[in-house]
């Protein structure tokens, strides 16, 4: 399941970058919005794949213990609330789906 995403709360999915590339699965899960958490160097390959089909929020977040995640939380929360209130489902992903994305979903 390393390349798949998991629904961690109703309508909130977390996973690795591969989850954001699989259009068939995104549509099957009813994803309407995607949050990409990436570093500057990951920007070359972590980017919106389907900008005409989904709304994207891209946040530059390093994968380090001293990254102040709380400073980007309000922006993430507004984005999630906006899409959840409209009945949408959100995928939050980073490169591996094991640190930044789950941490932000837990917040």
Image (spheres, rainbow, N blue to C red):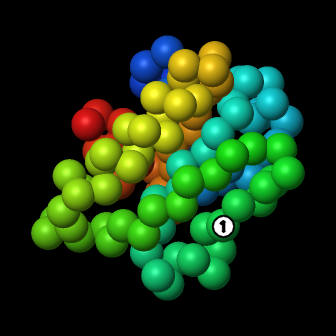
Badge 1 element = loop
Q: Nearer the viewer, residue 74 or 30?
A: 74
Determine whether 105 is above or below 70 in the image. above
Q: Quadrant of residue 33?
A: top right
Q: Quadrant of residue 25?
A: top right
Query: In the image, what residue occupies the spot 49% across and 40% down?
Result: 79
The total number of labels drawn is: 1
82 left or right of 69?
A: right
41 left or right of 26?
A: left
For label 1, the residue is: 47
Give x and y (percent) for residue 15: 52, 43
Q: Nearer the viewer, residue 83 or 93?
A: 83
Determine whether 60 is above or below 35 in the image. below
Other residues around mark 1 within 10 Å, as few (<14) / some (14–19) / many (≥20): some
Give x and y (percent) for residue 106: 29, 34
Give x and y (percent) for residue 42: 53, 76
User: Considering the image in quadrants, where does the N terminus appear?
Assistant: top right
Viewer can see residue 1: no
Determine whether 23 is above or below 63 in the image. above
Give x and y (percent) for residue 2: 54, 45
Q: Quadrant of residue 59?
A: bottom left
């Amino acid at each position: 399941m390393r390349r798949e995403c998991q629904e961690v709360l109703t309508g909130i999915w977390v996973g690795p970058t591969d989850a954001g590339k699989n259009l068939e699965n995104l549509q099957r899960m009813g994803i309407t919005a995607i949050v990409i958490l990436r570093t500057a160097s990951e920007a070359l390959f972590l980017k919106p794949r389907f900008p005409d089909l989904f709304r994207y929020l891209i946040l530059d977040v390093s994968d380090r213990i001293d990254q102040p995640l709380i400073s980007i939380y309000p922006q993430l929360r507004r984005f999630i609330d906006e899409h959840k209130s409209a009945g949408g489902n959100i995928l939050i992903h980073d490169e591996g789906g094991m640190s930044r994305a789950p941490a932000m979903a837990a917040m």
